[in-house]
Image (spheres, helix red, strand yellow):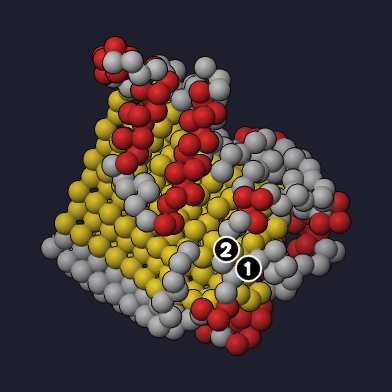
Amino acid sequence: MFLKEYITKIKNNTVLLDKKDWINRLDLFDHIKQDMPSSRIEEWKNFKTNYLKKTNWQLFNAQLKSSLDVSDGVKAFSNSIIFEDGKFNPTLSSYKSDQGIKVSNIKDYIESNPHIKSKLYSDSEKYAENRLSGVVDKTPAYFISLNSILSSGTVIEIQEKKKIEGLINIIHIFSNAENENLVNPYIAIISKKGSQSNIQEIFYDIDCWVNNVTEVFLENESKLVFSRLQSKVHKGIKTSSFNCHLENSAEIELKVLNRENCKEDIRVFLNEDNSKATISGMIFSCKNHQSDVFCKTVHKGKNTFSDQKWRLISAEKSKTSINGKICVNRNAKGSDASFYSKSLNLDENSNSFSKPELEILEDDVKCKHGASFGEIDKNIIFYMQSRGIKREDAIMMLVYAFIEEIGLGVNEGERQGIKLVDEIFKGLKGNE
């Protein structure tokens, strides 16, 4: 496997990358020398990694990339921060720095803000799973360690007490020079005390392996609405990690659209009192592919709140899955947490899996969970057809009603999500 050979050369200083003095290089190298996660561990039970293990991956080489034709759709985004093949491209970007948005490479940011080093991912235990058996399982954080070694990194800061008007667009585009390329975008988003912003992150057409990591830090009383959207994945695959840390009275509203050949790992840490996380998302897959999300909320502060709502849609012999975990730590009194998912299979050969999981180590808390599964009601379809509605249009109407339950389209940051959902179902109609 070329990737392992390349990593060995990096470790031996044969290949030079950006030096990161805040990471524990030896620990991370030892971590990724182990096998990739597989179905043997709970967080990866429903997403196959055999393809990743067997492919002869190599790091993306900018000198060999094909010419990238930036679409008019991408150019149309205002207030945009554009990443080309995992790296920030200031020429294509159009964000408004005078509004209170600051974009820096991670090394420069740390020089001005050395305290941030202690918050960033630096060793394999930070996002490890502490099993009830007492075992510290680092395996789920494998791809984060891989990204940390291979990425350069960008910091997006929302300055203190700034209320950003309008939508900030983080756009990822890829030249996909070779299908066996590995691209490692890393973004740290820092919302300073009392700031408010609305961010939309979109990943466009993927033909390679994208292994991205986003770390979000919300300081006291800051608020962030974050929409995380995935357009069509062609021949590629995406392993994605989103890790959010909230201080006192901070709030995040997270919206997710996860699609075929994508594994999303979401971890939200309610570290201080009165912090709040509202998470909702659509998980979709078609054509024998798989779409999987692991989402964990960890309650550490008192009177913290989290709510997860998921809608899963499987079509054309595919599989969707959600593992929603709620952890309430000791001393997190007054915590209120919930998880609920609904799954819809559009044909008899598609599958959907939902696993709510509660780990409660404190009393005086409220926690609830639930999951339901179903198929399109043929009687309702027949009734709608009898009223002159085409079968495929009737199915789409029912599906959109199903998605609407989680609030798709309520605010500005979700309009692009609606467009992507439209594309999904037009693709299905075209293959009937």
Residue 150 in sight from this viewpoint:
yes
Q: Does 205 sit left or right of 201 as displayed?
A: right
- Whether residue 372 is situated above or below residue 239 in the rendered picture: above
Q: Badge 2: how crowded within 10 Å, few (<14), some, or many (20+)?
A: some
- Which kind of residue does numbered mark 1 sit on? Ser
Q: Secondary structure at mark 2?
A: loop
Q: Does 158 sit left or right of 208 as displayed?
A: left
User: Looking at the rendering, which quadrant does residue 6 occupy?
Assistant: bottom right
Q: Badge 1: how crowded within 10 Å, few (<14), some, or many (20+)?
A: some
Q: Which residue has dot 1 on it?
A: 94
Q: CA distance from mark 1 to mark 2?
A: 6 Å
- Which kind of residue does numbered mark 2 sit on? Ser
Picture coordinates of residue 298 (x, y %)?
A: 33, 61
Residue 78's disc number: 2
Q: Secondary structure at mark 1?
A: loop
Q: Which residue appears at 40% of the width and 83% of the height?
A: 161
- Whether residue 267 is situated above or below residue 103 in the rendered picture: above
